[in-house]
Each structure stands twice: as C-alpha cells, then as structure tokens.
Amino acid sequence: MKRVGIIFGSTTGNTAKVASMIAERLGSQAIVHDIIDKELDGLDDYDICLFGIPTWDFGELQEDWADIWDSVKVLALPGKPCALFGLGDQIGYGEWFLDAMGLLHAELSRAGADLAGYWPIDGYDFEASKALTQDGSHFVGLALDEDSQSSETEARIDQWLDQLKRDFEMS
Ligand SMILES: Cc1cc2nc3c(=O)[nH]c(=O)nc-3n(C[C@H](O)[C@H](O)[C@H](O)COP(=O)(O)O)c2cc1C
C-alpha cells in the first residue's frame, strides 16, 4: 500500500474539507497534512503527494502557503509522484481563477516532481487563470469551486481519484 500525503493550507475551511473527502476515499493509506501544523516536514515519508491550495486576494497564495513559500521554492522532489487540487471562485474572482494552484505547480515542476492529475477546463466559466496547461486545454490540477459549483465537488473528486489511481498505480 502506498502512503499518500494530502498536504494543504486553508483559511475558511473549504480546502480542509476537500482534503478530508479525499482522505476518506483513500482510506488508511492517506495522511492528512495541514501545513499550518507541519509546514513541509516529512514529505519524504509519502510515496505520493497531493497538494491542496486555494487562491486568495486576487490571484495570491493562501496565507499558510505564503508563510512557507521560501521552503517551497527550495523543495527538491525528483521523480516524486505529485498532483494538485485547487480551490477558487470562478464567478467572484474569474480573472484570477485558481492562480495559486498555477504558482504551486510551477514550483513543483521546478522541484522535479512527476506531475499528474491534470483536469479539463470544460464545465467552468472564468476569464483567466494561471493554472492552465500551455495549450489552455487543462488545469494543472483538479479545479474545485465550493463558492459557485459545490454540487460538482464530490463527482469531480471521484473522477480525479480514478484518474490518479491509473496514473500512479495506487489502490
Ligand atoms: C477575499 C477573497 C479573495 C479571493 N480571491 C480569489 C481569487 O483571486 N481567485 C480565486 O479563484 N478565488 C478566490 N477566492 C475564493 C476562495 O479561493 C474560495 O472561497 C476557497 O474555497 C477558499 O478556500 P479555503 O476555505 O480553504 O481558504 C477569494 C475569496 C475571498 C473571500
């Protein structure tokens, strides 16, 4: 069984809730890791890392991620299977939708992570995002919107985990 770390920061609890939903689905292999307590300690203990990040304040990092960003910038994760999930609000903040997930994705790429879990943009309505693949067809991780599309969240998580299970050969 692979150990899956679910590493997240959350200001108003939405990303924390999603981290718990993912953990529930993965069962005993999942370790919920709130960076406000653990920062980035112990990432080596995880076989797979799932990073959760909401966007705040017009395209900015959530505050707990901002606090440890110097450590993120020097992370080395060569070959480590990683994926991201981002939370945002496409109606209220559609010009900056999920930007912080894009910022974290850029750092994980630089760190040498083996990234998967890209997610099609179909079904979302936003103006701009820094969390898109180069061709603009996908987000660089699972896109969740608890403000405008909360009824989609469960199904999106289920489908994304199915995709990751194939990509990362996890059970
Ligand atoms: C003041 C404020 C600023 C926000 N800025 C953005 C933003 O720039 N881009 C975005 O996609 N979502 C933005 N959001 C929406 C949050 O990302 C969203 O509510 C998210 O679910 C919060 O996650 P959390 O509860 O884990 O902190 C903002 C929300 C608030 C209240």
Image (spheres, helix red, strand yellow):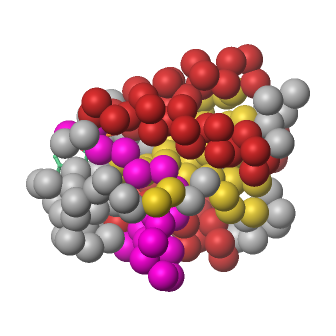
Residue 80 highlighted magenta (yes or no): no
For the point 76% across and 45% down, the residue is: 166
Quarter of the image for residue 91 reads bottom left
Q: Which residue lies furthest to the right in this view?
A: 1
Q: Compared to 123, does 77 lie above or below?
A: below
Q: Quadrant of the C terminus?
A: top right
Dominant SS in magenta: loop
Residue interval drawn in magenta: 130-147
Q: In the image shown, does 38 or 13 lie closer to the viewer?
A: 13
Q: In the image shown, does 162 or 14 lie closer to the viewer?
A: 162
Let me know if residue 104 appears in the view.
Answer: no
Let me know if residue 20 appears in the view.
Answer: yes
Q: Is residue 60 left or right of residue 101?
A: left
Q: Which residue lies furthest to the front in this view?
A: 122
Q: In the image shown, does 146 or 121 lie closer to the viewer?
A: 121
Q: Position of residue 158 (x, y in %)?
A: 54, 32
Q: Position of residue 163 (x, y in %)?
A: 65, 45
Q: In this view, does 129 lie to the left or right of 69?
A: left
For the point 45% across and 39% down, the residue is: 156
For the point 39% across and 62% down, the residue is: 121
Q: Quadrant of the N terminus?
A: top right
For the point 66% across and 76% down, the residue is: 110
